[in-house]
Image (cartoon, grey):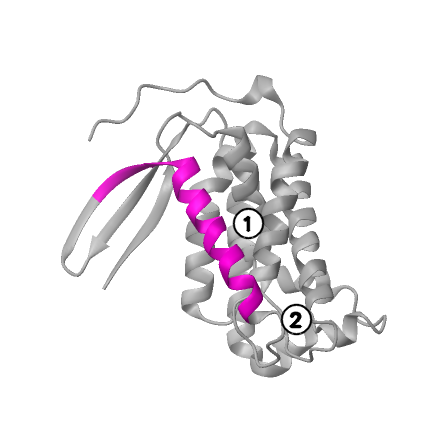
Amino acid sequence: MGGLIPLGDASRRRSHFPYATVLIILLNVFVFFHELQGGDAFVFQWAAIPAVILSGHNLITLLTSMFLHASWSHILGNMIFLWAFGPAMEDAMNPFSFTVFYLLGGLAAMSAQMAASPGSMVPTLGASGAIAAVMGGFLVTYPRDRIRALFFFFFFIRITFIPAILLIGFWFLMQLLNVGSVVSVQTGGVAYVAHVAGFLFGVVACSFFRRPQRIAPPSAWPRY
């Protein structure tokens, strides 16, 4: 069993504390504990259900569904990726602009998922669409940076450094390859359409939110 866990941008030091990123993570954790207490009733109340949304009801769930998660592994994975890429993007914007960018990315992702499965009654939830927007923005803002990552294979564990364009590019390619296999699925699964839409939103929209004067200069390349 192996895997790769991104830990953050290794090519530059943050110049500002990531207040918005931390707040978003704390809010996700807070809502998840409410989910654990409320169970399925809480999920069906606040998750986005495509058929319900497109009938003009519960539109607020397009927003609230971004803060719900299906399991411990779901929220842990999403928050790890948000912490890996969020602070650098918040550095390039500011806490307010980053928050707006994050929420709009999530809304774009959720809207695309609704359009892909308009008749579905399966709840759609998770922060991955918004985080995909952050990753898309990261790729075009810091294309030459390297990502510090934890690589593990069975009992072998080491810290490695991977070019952002390679790590994020491979991730996006996997989302594209999986889109066609789940568009018509009505019984749940990974919302690849939302991932792709969120990522593309981030690539296109980040230039309207980032502020070049806030971007820290790159430091020395990490040593292997």
Q: Alpha-carbon neighbours of circle 1 within 10 Å: few (<14), some, or many (≥20)?
A: many
Q: Position of residue 177 (x, y in %)?
A: 50, 59
162 in magenta: yes
Regarding residue 196, the answer to whether it shows in the image is yes
Question: Which label sits in the foreground, 1 or 2?
Answer: 1
Q: Is residue 193 left or right of residue 120?
A: left
The magenta segment: 159-181
Q: Residue at x 44, y 50 (%)?
A: 171
Are circles 1 and 2 on residues that touch, CB within 8 Å? no
Residue 24 locus on image (x, y percent): 56, 50
**Helix, strand or loop status at disc 1:** helix
Q: Which residue is mark 1?
A: 132
**Could you say which disc has been placed on residue 47 in the image?**
2
Amino acid type indicated by mark 1: Ala
**Kind of element beneath mark 2:** loop
Q: Is residue 27 magenta?
A: no
Q: Magenta: predominant secondary structure element?
A: helix
Decide which of 117, 55 is in the foreground and name it: 117
* Residue under the image location 58 percent in, 47 percent down: 199
